[in-house]
Image: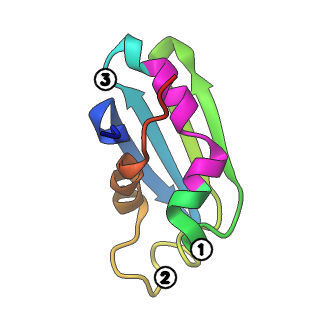
C-alpha cells in the first residue's frame, strides 16, 4: 500500500498574485528524508498538471524538517482573477497532500 504525503506531513499555504507557496512540514524528524525524496519539482508538476504553467521550486529548511514549495503561474492569473472555482493557495496546499511518498 502506498503512503501519501498526508501520512507524514502537515502543510501551510498561501498565494500572492499568480504564485502559490506551500510549507510542507514533516510530522516527525524521521519523516523528513521521505519528504525530501517525495516533494520534488517534477512530482509537484505531475500532480497538478496544466494548473501549474510556470516553474516549481522546492527549498529545504532542514533545521525545521520542512520544505518550501513555490508554484509560479499556478492560479490562472491570480486568486482574484482566476475563473477556477476555489483554487487559491489554501486549496492547492491541501491538494499537495495527495503526493505519494517515495520509499527508500
Q: Earlier in the sequence, mark 3 or mark 2?
A: 3
**Which label belongs to residue 27?**
3
Give neighbour class at mark 3: few <14, some 14-19, many 20+ (Cα, 10 Å): some
Identify the residue position indicated by label 1 in the image.
50
Number of marks: 3
Answer whether residue 36 is magenta in the image. yes
Q: Earlier in the sequence, mark 2 or mark 1?
A: 1
Looking at the rendering, which quadrant does residue 3 occupy? top left
Image location of residue 6, percent across then percent down: 30, 40
Answer whether residue 16 is magenta in the image. no
Secondary structure mainly formed by the magenta segment: helix
Instruction: Quote the CA–CA distance across marks 3 and 2.
Output: 33 Å
Q: Given the current orientation, which residue lies at the most extreme bottom position?
A: 83
**Which label belongs to residue 82?**
2
Image location of residue 80, percent across then percent down: 45, 78
Residue at point 57%, 68% (across, down): 49
Please name which of the two marks, 2 or 1, marks the residue nearer to the observer.
Answer: 1
Image location of residue 96, percent across then percent down: 42, 51
Q: Secondary structure at mark 1?
A: helix
Boundaries of the magenta span: 32-44
Q: In this picture, is 38 found above or below 52?
A: above
Q: Nearer the viewer, residue 101 or 89?
A: 101
Residue at point 49%, 34% (across, down): 102
Image location of residue 75, percent across then percent down: 53, 71
Q: Nearer the viewer, residue 94 or 34?
A: 34
Q: Earlier in the sequence, mark 1 or mark 3?
A: 3
Amino acid at each position: 500500500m502506498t503512503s501519501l504525503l498526508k501520512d507524514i506531513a502537515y502543510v501551510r499555504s498561501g498565494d500572492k498574485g499568480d504564485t502559490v507557496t506551500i510549507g510542507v512540514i514533516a510530522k516527525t524528524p524521521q519523516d523528513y528524508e521521505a519528504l525530501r525524496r517525495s516533494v520534488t519539482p517534477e512530482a509537484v508538476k505531475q500532480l497538478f498538471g496544466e494548473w501549474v504553467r510556470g516553474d516549481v521550486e522546492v527549498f529545504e529548511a532542514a533545521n525545521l524538517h520542512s520544505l518550501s514549495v513555490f508554484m509560479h503561474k499556478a492560479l490562472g492569473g491570480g486568486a482574484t482573477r482566476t475563473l477556477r472555482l476555489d483554487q487559491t493557495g489554501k486549496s492547492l496546499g491541501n491538494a499537495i497532500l495527495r503526493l505519494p511518498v517515495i520509499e527508500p
